Amino acid sequence: MAESKDGLFDKAKKYASLKYSLWFLDTLYVLFLLWVFLGLGLSKLFVQRISALGFSEKFTLPTYLFILLFLYFVLDFPLNYYRSYCLEHKFCLSSQHFRGWFFDQVKAGMLSYVLGLILLSAFYFILKYYQQVWWLLASLFWIFFSLVLAKLIPILIIPLFFKYKKLEDSTLRERIMNLASKMKVKILDCFEIDFSKKTLKANAAFVGWGATRRVILADTLKDKYTYDEIEVILAHEFAHYKLKHLLKLLLVNASVIVACFYLIFKTSAPLLRFFGLSSLQELAALPLILLYFVVFGILMQPFENYVSRRLERHADRMALETTGLKDAFISMMEKMAAQNLADRKPHPFIKFFFFDHPPIAERVASVQDLK
């Protein structure tokens, strides 16, 4: 029997409340672990032990990073297990068995290790040879790397976690391709991924750039939404591209990266002395750099969310101006809110801090107000 609207609303509120609480708990836990790792001298001890093994210096960073990430994986496992496995099953949002979930966590950890190693290797190289402008050069490299990663996501990263194939529904594919042509958006093709093997949530995306740009539909969305509803979703995604929102978000994120590295450059000296470290070039200082990024990320999150919410409203408006599918947009929002257990009317503070999209109730109300 389908749940009533009030029942779904209460369920979504409870789910969202637990997610917010777990975010705060997880963030405090990460800050605590980094502080303890520095304060107890464990970071210096691990570097010393690795060096004592007699490995070449070029293996010190890979070994240290592996130990750091492995320890975090183990120490965070109970909280991560509850947050991403137990909670999703408790609210009937996951269809994934423990074995599949665990291997996904291992794959995500290995991916984090590889990407982190690339970024940190470049960071320490720049730090060593460009001591006065390292903060700017390191920022530029990280920004460039994020662009490369955006191109590789659909062809290397998504296939690690999902199987996807070309969209078999020829009618839907034709509608999407016609919409892209109408909005003057070039795409490689339309694909569907097997979301239903892991989650019951719905999603769609316009990912990649250049030759890898493509539309990806989750089967949980493709099979449960009308053609009109899917078209207005993708019109919204294409609007982001047409309005250059991705470039704007890139500039915001780039500014945050530059600001964080510059803050480290200007203020890290007293903290290094406090933890008994000589300089940022010392590998044992890596947890301090991570501490900066976690704290600065928390402080900047409301600003980044505010910018993102404004862009989302603009994309909604363009999607409706392009398609004229006002009723389909509203029904799609209602379906997605129920399917994903979205918090439709969050407290203003929750919206300010967590929401990078306008809440569902606001998006529906703004559409209803359109002539």
Image (spheres, helix red, strand yellow):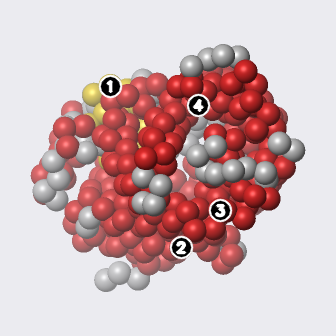
Q: Which mark is residue 194?
A: none
**Kind of residue at disc 3:** Ser
Judging depth in this view, the residue of 38 and 248 nearest the camera is: 38
Residue position for label 2: 303
Q: Nearer the viewer, mark 1 or mark 3?
A: 3
Q: The disc labelled 2 sits on which kind of residue?
A: Phe
Task: Specify whether residue 359 is in view.
Answer: no
Q: Earlier in the sequence, mark 3 or mark 2?
A: 3
Of tags 2 and 1, the one toward the viewer is 2
Q: Quote the CA–CA distance across marks 2 and 4.
A: 34 Å
Q: Secondary structure at mark 3?
A: helix
Residue appearing at x 37%, y 44% in the figure: 145
Q: Nearer the viewer, mark 2 or mark 4?
A: 4
Crowding near the residue tagged with mark 3, few <14, some 14–19, many ≥20 C-alpha atoms within 10 Å: some
Nearest to N terminus: mark 2 or mark 1: 1
The residue drawn where x is 45% and y is 72% is: 307
Q: CA distance from mark 1 to mark 3?
A: 48 Å
Q: Secondary structure at mark 2?
A: helix
Q: Secondary structure at mark 4?
A: helix
Residue at 62%, 17% in the rendered image: 55
Front position among marks 3 and 2: 3
Label 1 secondary element: strand
Q: Counting other residues with Cα less than 10 Å from the Cα at mark 1, is it few (<14), some (14-19), or many (20 or more)?
A: few
Q: Position of residue 233 (x, y in %)?
A: 36, 55
Residue 155 versus residue 305 in the image, above or below: above
Q: Which residue is mark 3?
A: 268
Kindly identify which residue carries mark 4: 61
Q: Which residue carries the number 1 mark?
A: 165
The disc, 1 or 3, on the residue closer to the chain's N-terminal end is 1
- First along the sequence among labels 4 and 3: 4
User: In the picture shown, does residue 229 fall above or below 77?
Assistant: below
Q: Residue at x 45, y 41 (%)?
A: 125
